[in-house]
Image: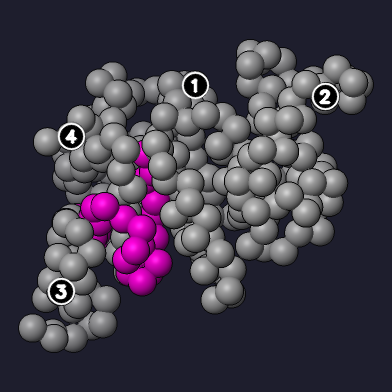
Amino acid sequence: MAEAILETDGLTKVFGGFTAVGGVNLRVETGTIHALIGPNGAGKTTCFNLLTKFLQPSAGTISFAGQDITAKKPADVARLGMVRSFQISAVFGHLTAVENVRVALQRDRGRNFDFWRSDRVLRRYNDRAHELLFDVGLSDAVDVPAAELSYGRKRALEIATTLALEPRLMLLDEPTAGMTEADVSRIVALISRLRAGRTILMVEHNLSVVSGLSDKITVLTRGKILAEGDYATVSNHPDVITAYLGTDHA
C-alpha cells in the first residue's frame, strides 16, 4: 500500500442537529489523483472545508504528512504544503495574469508581499511565472488583466497560482463548476497534464469529469462514504447509480 499524505479518522461535522459529515475515514495516497464526489448536498464542500481547516470538526482527526492538523488554522496547513483552490475563482482581477502568479511566487519572502516594490525588484519572479502560465495554457495572456479572461481561463490562472506555491497536496474545489463544455474539456486536459509527480484531491459532482483522471474515487452521500474505488468500481455500484439517478439500476 502506498504512503498516505492525507488521512482522516471519524471526521464529523454537526450544524445544530444536522450532521453534514458523519464519520468519514478518508485516505489520500501520495502521487495520486483522488476525487471526492457525490450528488448535490452530499457533504463534499463541508468535508473539503474541514480538510483545509476553514471549518473545525465536531469530532474526528485529520493528519497531513504524518502530522495531526486537526486544530490548525488554514494558513498553518497552507504553509505545510496543503494548498486549495475555491469554487469561485479567487484571482486579482485588476492584476495581469503574470502579476497574479508573481504574487504567489513571493512566498519565498516569508510574510512580505511587496505590492509597492518596483517592477525591477520583482522581475526575478518573471521566468517562473511565465513557465507556470505556459503549463496551464495561458502563454498568450501574460499581460492580460485577470478580469478580462473568460471564466475557464480564470480557473486555469488560479491553478497556476496554486502551483506557484509548490504544494505537496493540491486541493481543487469543483474545478469545472459553472463552465461550458469546451472549458470543462480544457480544465480536465490541464489537470491530466499537471498530474505527473503531484498529489491532487479534487471535489466534483460530475462522474464523467473524474472518469479519466482519478486513480481513486470516494463517493459521499448524506455526509457518509457510500462507495470507494476506481471509476469502473464506483460507476457500476448500484447504490451510486441510485444516489445519482434516483432510481435503482441494479
- Quadrant that contains the C terminus: bottom left
Report the Cα–Cα distance between label 3 and label 4: 25 Å
Specify the segment rendered in magenta: 199-224
Q: Is 77 colored magenta in this rendering?
A: no
- Front position among marks 4 and 1: 4
Report the Cα–Cα distance between label 2 and label 1: 24 Å
Q: How many marks?
A: 4
- Front position among marks 3 and 4: 4
Q: Nearer the viewer, residue 16 or 226?
A: 226
- Where does label 3 land, which residue? 236
Q: Is residue 215 left or right of 213 when viewed as pictured?
A: left
Report the Cα–Cα distance between label 1 and label 3: 39 Å
Q: Position of residue 219 (x, y in %)?
A: 23, 60
- Where does label 1 land, which residue? 79
* Image disc number at residue 2: 4
Disc 4 + disc 2, Cβ < 8 Å: no
Residue at x 41%, y 42% (from the top left corner): 196
Q: Residues within 10 Å of mark 1 (few under 14, many from 20)?
A: few
* Image disc number at residue 123: 2
- Residue 116 against residue 191 in the figure, above or below: above
Q: Position of residue 59 (x, y in %)?
A: 22, 35
Label 2 sits on a secondary structure element that is: helix
Residue at x 33%, y 48% (from the top left corner): 33
Report the Cα–Cα distance between label 4 and label 1: 24 Å
Report the Cα–Cα distance between label 2 and label 3: 52 Å
Inspect the image, locate mark 3, and give the three-letter code of the amino acid beneath it.
Asn
Inspect the image, locate mark 4, and give the three-letter code of the amino acid beneath it.
Ala
